[in-house]
Image (cartoon, rainbow, N blue to C red):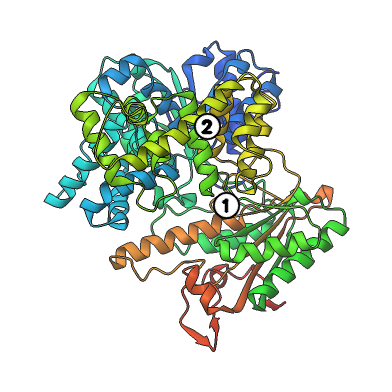
Amino acid sequence: MAWEHGLDTDSVAYAIASAPETRIRVVAGPGTGKSFAMKRRVARLLEEGLSPKELLAVTFTRVAAEDLHRELQKLGVPGCEELEGQTLHSLAMRILSRKHVLEAVGRTPRSLNSFEMKALLCDIGEASGGRRAAKKMIHGYTAAWAQSQGDEPGFAKTDGEKAFQSSLLAWLEFHRGMLIGELIPYLVRYLKDNPAAAERSEFKHLLVDEYQDLNKAEQTAIAFLGEAAEICIVGDDDQSIYSFKCAHPDGIREWKDLHSTCADLEMADCHRCPTTVVEMANALINVNKNRSPRALNPLPNKGAGEVAVVQVPYLENEATWITAKVKELLEKGVHPSEIIILVQRAVATKPILNALRNEGIPAKSYYEESQLDSEAAQMRFALFKLFLDNEDRVALRYLLGCGQDDFRCKPYARVRQHCESTGDSPWTSMNKLAEETLKIPYTKPLALQFKIIREALEKLEEIKGDLAAFIDALMPEADPDVSELRQLALAQMETVETPDKLFTAMMEEITQPDIPPTVEDVRLMSLHKSKGLSSPFVFIAGCVEGILPPSFDDAPSKEAKDAALEEARRLFYVGITRVKADPDNDRPGSLFITYAQQMPAKDAYAANVAFKTQSGPLANLLPSRFIGELGPAAPAPVKG
């Protein structure tokens, strides 16, 4: 099928697909058909002879990349089976792993899982004012990188910060590891310092989705990678919701000024939402001041839809009301996968999830990205890493310390000092200690722990040829603490045959978790997680002050508080525009906004839910201010 088949030549989608300019900006609101237009553009490029290897399609999630691939295959575009849509982090990992890049960068792109950070914090925390202080400074270090453009991040200003940064980098370099937040900055540094690098001309066309969610370092990486290429960026600053990842929405706003001859296109017709929701969304987002004025266009053929705003007395009543409504929908023939429930705090998710399951309703919470939540699962996964590579210093360090609050940091420091003075690796040194051919004072607990680790590895080595037996030994069915990790392994076993390929598949699922493209359950997730999804039935629960928006009492300035409030408003905007109307198939598009008057104060404190007053043991909650900003199209709240 030709790329232009069925396209109206006067449509914005056609203009995007056919634009000949070398720099293109597409501002596309929610539900306006940007994915459709992007796919047609890629199809045109491939049909015109562009090699799939010369086209870089950068998406925000792996599911989006896989979706692009599937849709192109449906179009029957030659070469589509070779097309690689990928996230920028996976691309950075691939480039940094090349031998010549490794030599130039001088760092090993072996990223740390979050649980492995515990060993790092114990090792460097004592000299940095404690683990909490060290964790805060690591955040400052990676945030400074994210906000830089490949220069020194400017994090270390005081003598204490300089000493901490030196200690952090020494640990990472010795253990041959890298923080997730360092991947893109080191890619930028390599590209910047090597203007003749092949990577700067590897691609002839870049297509970048959700550009507003990239931070400065990521946007700089795109600029270097696309230096000799055509670049098409797509996004919407009204949907920028990732400041905690240092997203830089000004990047998409300023694109036109930086590229004066670029094609500048806008998609505003909302093909997803019912007209009532579009009008509510326009009223809400128009409250924000730091934005370019524009509006979504409601399409009459989508119908008015169904919207309800419901207040209940207590938090548990909210779960009861939502469950009853879901049950009613299922009895009318709605499939569970057509329903998504958005809750911004896990404290409000658990009662809803439990209530649904108690009624026998299939439901899954995507707060449960918890394959590595338990210490047992963390230990097993680290053991898996060490099995594949005995010289994985991060995994060995974690395993030597796990089970102890201080991660045996003092005896380990002696082993590390020995390694640095002799050139021995930690694995070699620990073997010598275990065999008593090396003596280091006060390291006996480490040697005993290492013997346990080595014995476990030897047992795995004996059965590595039988993948099912390997999984049974590493992640026993009888151990409930590793059940989610085991389920993940069994799911991946269907497509892999060896332990190394199994690990790669599992690591990708754990470090880049996404909502699968096909589901059978009612889905519960945060509003952030819902980005890119749509559904005919959407619930947004917990719409109270202190949750949506959260409290900004600790904001350093009024400017910071205002910026955080605008982002929270954008997040609510993203949430309500997940509603998809399909009136011809008896799906008018239904949005249910719920909130409680009270919840237990102890639960509110534990979940960091801000509230002003309480009645006995109950916190008095206030409706989210965003409900009052939905404009005249929104229905009046009712009692549930």
> Which quarter of the picture shows residue 590?
bottom right
Kind of residue at badge 1: Leu
Amino acid type at mark 2? Ala
* Relative vertical location of residue 345 with respect to residue 126 in this rendering, above or below: below
The residue located at (51%, 48%) in the rendering is 375
Residue 302 shows in the view = yes
Secondary structure under tag 2 reads helix
Residue extending farthest to the left is 159
Relative to 90, residue 236 above or below: below
Task: Please state the horizontal and vertical placement of residue 106, each as a whole percent of the image.
Answer: 26, 24
Q: In this view, does 90 lie to the left or right of 615?
A: left
Left or right: residue 471 versus residue 572 is right
Residue bearing mark 1 = 296
- The residue lying toward the viewer, choosing from 72 and 402, is 402
Q: What's the distance in space between the residues labelled 2 and 1, CA to CA?
A: 59 Å
- Find disc 2 in the rendering and name its residue: 456
Q: Please tell me how crowded label 2 is: few (under 14), some (14-19), or many (20+) other residues with Cα within 10 Å.
A: some
Residue 636 in sight from this viewpoint:
no
Work out whether residue 419 or residue 573 is closer to the camera in this orientation and state it: 419
State the count of labels.
2
Say which quarter of the image contains residue 359: bottom right
Nearer-N-terminus badge (2/1): 1
**Residue 623: x percent and y percent?**
56, 75
Q: Residues within 10 Å of mark 1 (few under 14, many from 20)?
A: many
Disc marking residue 588: none
Q: Which of 422 and 539 is in front in this view?
A: 422
